[in-house]
Amino acid sequence: MSVNIREATRSYEDWMRRCTTVVESDLRSKHEKMKEDTFLFLRATFYRWAQVWPEICADLSQAPRVMACGDLHVGSFGTWRDSEGRLCWGVDDFDESYPLPYTNDLVRLATSLKIVNDSDELTVGLKAGCDAILEGYEHTLKEGGCPIVLAEREQNLERLGIGAIKPAPDFWRKLNELPVVRRTLPRDAKQTLEKTLPDSNMEYKIVRRAAGLGSRGQQRFVAIAQWNGGCIAREAKAMLPSSCVWLNGRVGYGQSCYRPTIAAAARSRDPFQIIKGAWLIRRLSPDSNPIEIKDLPKKRDEQALLHAMGREAANVHLGSKNVVNRILQDLHRRKADWLRSAAKEMAKITERDWKKYARA
């Protein structure tokens, strides 16, 4: 690897500025977060992963390609309500979706497991965790997919640890305290937000929000209104092409793979999650949120959780139906410890990059 992490970061962020308007203060806060620990660094630097993974895991990079999540890790899962109001769980971040080898998502998920294991946020062993991911993944591919709807599965909900998570009581207070936007709201973002509200003529305010890690620095605007006795919110986030577009030396507009990836996946979709032009629109609420590993209760079945993550990776990859048989054949020809070995190697590379970045 002739390009170091600092050079890669500068190149990627220069590319970002050519693709969209960047919030420089948010980008500076991202840099500080990247220095805190290896897991935050991993989450913030998919561009670096896209750069080094094909070299470190050359054999795996030749595996059958799917419409992949791209930036998959143990913190990229969350809950939402489907069109029937049921609570669903699964991948909630497709910002880096792109046609990639199916192994990319599995190795990145397992690498994140290795990293959080080293920081004691998960206690299941790497071998047991990788086995659970692969078992869930392969079983769901063979099954043809199964959206993970939690509303009728109380026992599974409790085993995953998700049932014990209570919505933050100060969710709306914190959202309402964000700085109000008065003049800098792009016209297309304003029009798009208004169309997604229950009444396009209703009164609302716009606040600016900083969130996430990989997407920090991209513009986020939230419309907040009172409707039928309570608060509602819609967020518009400026989209970027996948980091793989940067890696290929191209400049793009928006995220062309986001919509087809979630549309084809085996899932009960969030009806409020839509792409309009260069903007991703989402409903914000206390029960439509990412779930951080550190927020899960200590009483949980970690192998069941990782099994579910493997299942959900398969649900996404099943959107590429024509390659499922090739994936299963590819899985069967690999050595038993292929995922664990790749995760160890990528975790080592990621930690090395983090140490270099944090020292500078």
Image (cartoon, rainbow, N blue to C red):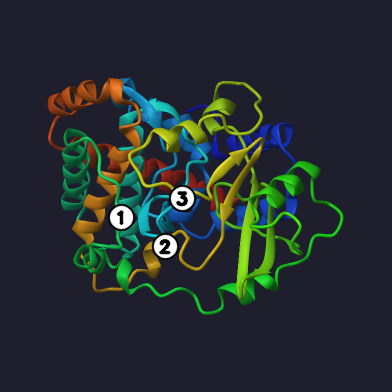
**Residue identifier under label 1:** 149
Residue contact at pointers 1 and 3, CB within 8 angstroms: no
Residue at the spot 71% in from the left edge and 51% down from the top edge: 194
* In this picture, residue 308 sits left or right of residue 197: left
Quarter of the image where one finds residue 263 = top left
Residue at the spot 34% in from the left edge and 58% down from the top edge: 116
**Residue identifier under label 2:** 292
Q: Nearer the viewer, residue 349 or 107?
A: 107
Furthest-bottom residue in view? 169
Q: Is residue 23 above or below residue 230?
A: above
Amino acid at the residue labelled 3: Asp
Amino acid at the residue labelled 2: Glu
Q: Residues within 10 Å of mark 3 (few under 14, many from 20)?
A: many
Secondary structure under badge 2? loop
**Residue identifier under label 3:** 270
Mark 2 or mark 3, whichever is nearer to me = 3
What's the distance in space between the residues labelled 1 and 3, CA to CA? Answer: 12 Å
